[in-house]
Amino acid sequence: MTDPRKSSALIELSGVTRVYEMGEVDVHALRGVDLLVEKGEFTAIVGASGSGKTTLLNVLGCLDLPTAGTYRLNGRDVTTLNDRQISRLRGEGIGFVFQNYSLLSRFSALDNVEMPRYYRDRHGDAKRARELLELVGLADRAKHKPTELSGGQQQRVAVARALMNDPFLLLADEPTGNLDSKSGDALITLLESLSTEQGLTIVMVTHDSDVSARAHRVVRMADGAVVDDTRNN
């Protein structure tokens, strides 16, 4: 494994396995995964249902821990941290974007974007939230509730929310899955710009080959293992 003191990788997985006990059966969701993701890289994870890609994303997001192996995130060995340290690392360093947007329907776009700051600092930052809505092209929709927004607009609000605490890592789980092709293309263009222009590290799970082709590299999984790792031109 590369010496983390000399590595530019943000994500370093070495021999990571994840086993779930399902009654008397052990389900091996990840099998000895080795993976390096450099800072500022836009990586797509692809594979059939049950290949382990969502489990891998959960491990990367510190929502789940490896059964065995080592995971270093931004130089820290996640497997040695306690629950409070992991929660803080997740809240301060990682932004999440989900397929179903996960916006709170009672609140405006602005309020939804502010929400992570309330969880972290117990107070919001409306100025920063407005800046992020402007970044994703929705400054004029700040007061609109999710039901008043299109799917593509809701997902851009979700991206803005994910950026609220200035994370060093953005994780996206099928972010275009509920979008039409035009909205999906606009969203991926946004993610590309966040990576290329702002240096944000992005890892995205997708089943769409047109979407994965827009990433810097494509990591293909099967049966809980990485079976191919290809860089796009």
Image (spheres, helix red, strand yellow):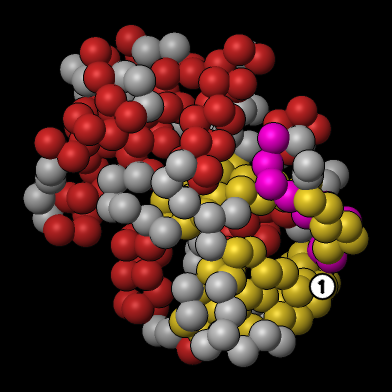
Per the image, label 1 sits on a secondary structure element best described as strand
Whole-percent x, y for residue 26 in the image: 80, 73
Q: Amino acid at mark 1?
A: Arg
Q: The N terminus is located in which quarter?
A: bottom right
Height in image: 12 above or below 208? below
Q: Residue at x 69, y 35 (%)?
A: 214
Kindly give the residue lying farthest to the left in the view shown: 123
Q: Could you say which quadrant of the image residue 127 lies in?
A: top left
Q: Could you say which quadrant of the image residue 173 lies in?
A: top right
Camera-side residue of 120 and 127: 127
Is 103 part of what is drawn in magenta?
no
| Camera sees residue 20 | no
Badge 1 local density, few (<14 within 10 Å), some, or many (20+)?
some
Q: Which residue is mark 1?
A: 31
Would residue 185 appear left or right of 84 to someone viewing this image? Answer: right
Q: Could you say which quadrant of the image residue 149 lies in?
A: top left
| Camera sees residue 37 | yes
Whole-percent x, y for residue 23 in the image: 75, 70
Magenta region: which residues?
214-225
Would residue 166 appear left or right of 174 to someone viewing this image? Answer: left
Q: Residue at x 53, y 62 (%)?
A: 39
Q: Residue at x 61, y 21 (%)?
A: 185
Height in image: 158 above or below 18? above
Camera-side residue of 205 and 58: 205
